[in-house]
Amino acid sequence: MRLFLLSMLMLLQLNCKSKKNTIEFNKTAEKRIFNLENCATDTQCAIEIISNSNLRIALDEQGKNYIQLEKGDNTIVKYEFKKDEPPNTMDAHYSEMIYFEIDKNDKHLFLTNEALQNVKMIYARFCYCKDGTSGYFKVTQGRLNLVKNDNELSIHLNFKVGKIPQLLTEIKEIIKLNSE
């Protein structure tokens, strides 16, 4: 009986190890988060810069978009807009995000409408919404003007995502990259 329990314990330990490729991605990705002050009342806004990464947009079994961040040569920019939740409420979470990928050598981008897919721009909306308007949606209407140098990143984005209700339609930020 002791031998059986010992072999079961060893088998359990072997099955609980993390997958190596997940750990490698976390070690190589450099993430910098910038909390923003120009945000609406009762909300939080932040930009996350993820170096050495690629953005992959895929479809699930129901034909809905989802994203995966992978080890790569590019930089992912993630802007998050999150409403403060009222205390003592259930299902009151609400957030919107924009993700896009830029080549690490890009210094200036000006993209409009369908060309926004050149940077794999995708909008995410998460809420307790019963109308099917939560999830990830490709952005094909709008204008992005991005300027990057060693010291700062300037983003000016106006966009619309079809018939999805949005609170976030414009991002206008200058991020000081060497402020740490």
Image (tube, rainbow, N blue to C red):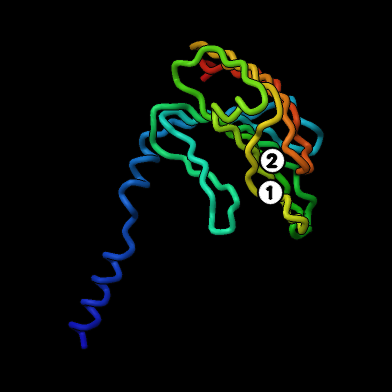
Which residue in the rendered view is the most extreme toward the left? 3
Q: Name the residue under label 2.
A: 96
Which residue in the rendered view is the most extreme toward the front? 114
Rendered position, 148 above or below 101: above
Q: Is residue 58 left or right of residue 110?
A: left
Write the residue at 54% across / 27% down: 118
Q: x, y (%) of residue 62?
A: 59, 58
In the rendered structure, which amino acid carries the disc numbered 1?
Phe
Q: x, y (%) of residue 156?
A: 68, 19
Q: x, y (%) of residue 164?
A: 76, 43
* Label 1 CA crowd tier, 10 Å (few <14, some 14–19, many 20+): some
In the rendered structure, which amino acid carries the disc numbered 2?
Glu
Q: In which quarter of the image is residue 158?
A: top right
Dot 2 falls on a residue whose secondary structure is: strand
In this rendered view, identify the residue nearer to me: 34 or 170.
Answer: 170
Q: Mark 1 points at which residue?
A: 126
Compute the Cα span from label 1 to label 2.
6 Å
Q: Is residue 135 left or right of residue 75?
A: right
Rendered position, 44 above or below 125: above
Write the residue at 21% across / 76% down: 7
